[in-house]
Amino acid sequence: MPSFVADSIVVERVEPSPNFDERQSLAHPDIILLHYTGMQHAHEAIQRLCDPVARVSAHYFVYENGSIAQLVPEQKRAWHAGVSSWEGDTDINSRSIGIEIANPGHDFGYPDFPARQIAAVTMLCRAILTRHVIRPENILAHSDVAPNRKQDPGEKFPWQRLAQSGIGLWVEPSPIADKQVSAPGDTGENVASLQKALNEYGYGLEQTGRYDEATKVVVTAFQRHFRPARVDGIVDMSTLETLRRLLAARQWPTVPKASTPAP
């Protein structure tokens, strides 16, 4: 792909990826989707994101030292979300701007994110928000939209620090207590109400009244993002109260969208 002009002055250089196409349905993206690379070395990750055989990409890449590269213009659809769902929509690539954050991830020791890297991610997100109308609750983890496949950027990612800079929706998690509310194998109204609340927030979860594997992975994703002190897929009062407070803190109710085919 020929080079292009970066969308923001925070970008240090352009590393063009051929892996993109046209956005569908929305004129402008309304999600920022954060990933970690999950590879041992940053240079290997960016090579893969620019490899036409791999057929994956992202709009931005943030190195450990805070350097930012742009791979795909924001007006184009990068290929980073994969099979995913949010608010009833399955074409998350068309709705989102994808940011890959260099970190080896859970398979390779999962180190902390350096402070300068997080500062760069924050600066980049703030720049994106000057160009696009994106609600705080739509600044998401890859694990939020693909909970059965992904766990990035993971429980070490400092969502609270970003929220303090005006990036994303965050409420202080309710204190962890031993009282269990729902767990795998449970059935009944409590489970149905939990599934309804998670679906209302945006997670792709059917309201069956059964605490099945799909429910467990969504609860785990929710905890990984919003209650990272204990990520176990079991609903205690802390998890439930944190979810209720997040629903109350949203700017306005979300209207589920009709599903569209994934690219």
Image (spheres, rainbow, N blue to C red):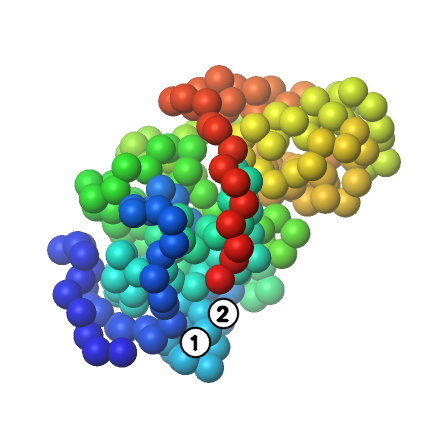
Question: Residue under circle 2?
Answer: 39
**Looking at the picture, how far across and down is residue 91, in whole percent?**
48, 52
Is any atom of residue 156 visible in this view?
no
Q: Nearer the viewer, mark 2 or mark 1?
A: 1
Question: Residue under circle 1?
Answer: 48
Q: Residues within 10 Å of mark 2 (few under 14, many from 20)?
A: some
Query: Does 79 sit left or right of 261 as displayed?
Result: left
Q: Does 235 appear above or below 111?
A: above
Label 1: state its secondary structure: helix
Are the residues flagged by discs 2 and 1 in contact, CB closer than 8 Å?
A: yes
**Looking at the picture, how far across and down is residue 150, in whole percent?**
58, 55
**Looking at the picture, how far across and down is residue 254, in whole percent?**
47, 28
Q: Which one is in front, 80 or 243?
A: 80
Please give the name of the residue rendered at 77% of the width and 33% of the height, measured from the top-left corner. 208
Quadrant occupied by the N terminus:
bottom left
Label 2: state its secondary structure: loop
Q: CA distance from mark 2 to mark 1?
A: 10 Å
Please give the name of the residue rendered at 37% of the width and 33% of the height, measured from the top-left corner. 136
Q: Amino acid at mark 1?
A: Arg
Circle nearer the N terminus (2, 1): 2
Q: Which one is in front, 202 or 14?
A: 202
Q: Does 237 appear above or below 28?
A: above
